[in-house]
Amino acid sequence: MPNTYSQLYIQIVFAVKGRQNFIHESFRNELQKYISGIVKKQKQKLYAIYCMPDHTHTLVSIKPDVAISDLVRDIKSYSSSFVKQKSFKEDFAWQTGFGAFSYSKSQALNVVNYILRQPEHHKKKSFKAEYIEFLESSKSNMMKNICLNFMNKRGGYIAPMELKILLYFFLLIWRP
């Protein structure tokens, strides 16, 4: 994209399938380097990465012509194959889905520090509590998007029980 300037900083968080503690310290650095290579091969810039035993945080700057979902798909697919190929964990897989959170350039250094301090952070706060906190920070459009996505998958109809489930989920994450 000639003559295009952008500053798109995205923190991407994704979990090991079943939230299993499959990422061991013995190969964590090698996995992080491999994921770094995937991001670089996709011509994006990785600012920070930390693989916890059951999830991974990255901060990337992406070009506007790259879909975040495509980048995450490639990271998860190639890194999963890498872990299996290296025999680190034969039944390794990433969980479906991910979280993506945007930041300004002025916030980037704080996010880098946060990612690199994951072990300290998770001594105080679980992944679930942390993820709910991320969701709450963007809650204004989240419930609308969840309902719209849910309805689109069902032809615009939400059954009463499904609506109760959605409302329950909403109440879990929406704390005034």
Image: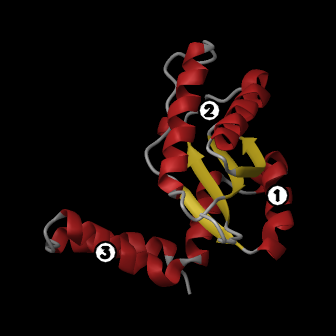
Q: Mark 2 sits on what residue?
A: 21
Residue at position x 55%, y 70% in the image? 135
Residue at 70 percent across and 35 percent down: it is 37
Q: Quick check: 67 left or right of 133? A: left
Q: Tell me which amino acid carries mark 3.
A: Cys
Image location (x, y in percent) of residue 141: 46, 81
Are the residues flagged by discs 1 and 2 in contact, CB closer than 8 Å?
Answer: no
Marks 1 and 3 sit apart, C-alpha to C-alpha, by 32 Å
The residue sitting at 56% across, 87% down in the picture is 176
Residue underneath mark 3: 147
Q: Position of residue 128 (x, y in %)?
A: 58, 56
Please name whichever residue, 14 or 77, is drawn nearer the observer in this view of the structure. Answer: 77
SS label for mark 3: helix
Give amino acid for label 2.
Answer: Asn
Mark 2, other Cα within 10 Å: few <14 / some 14–19 / many ≥20: few
Which label is found at residue 146?
none
Left of 38 or right of it: where is 109? Answer: right
| 75 over 98 or under it: above or below | above
Q: Is residue 19 visible?
A: no
Dot 1 falls on a residue whose secondary structure is helix
* Circle 2 SS class: loop
x, y (%) of residue 67?
50, 57
Q: Which residue is mark 1?
A: 112
Cα–Cα span, label 1 and label 2: 23 Å
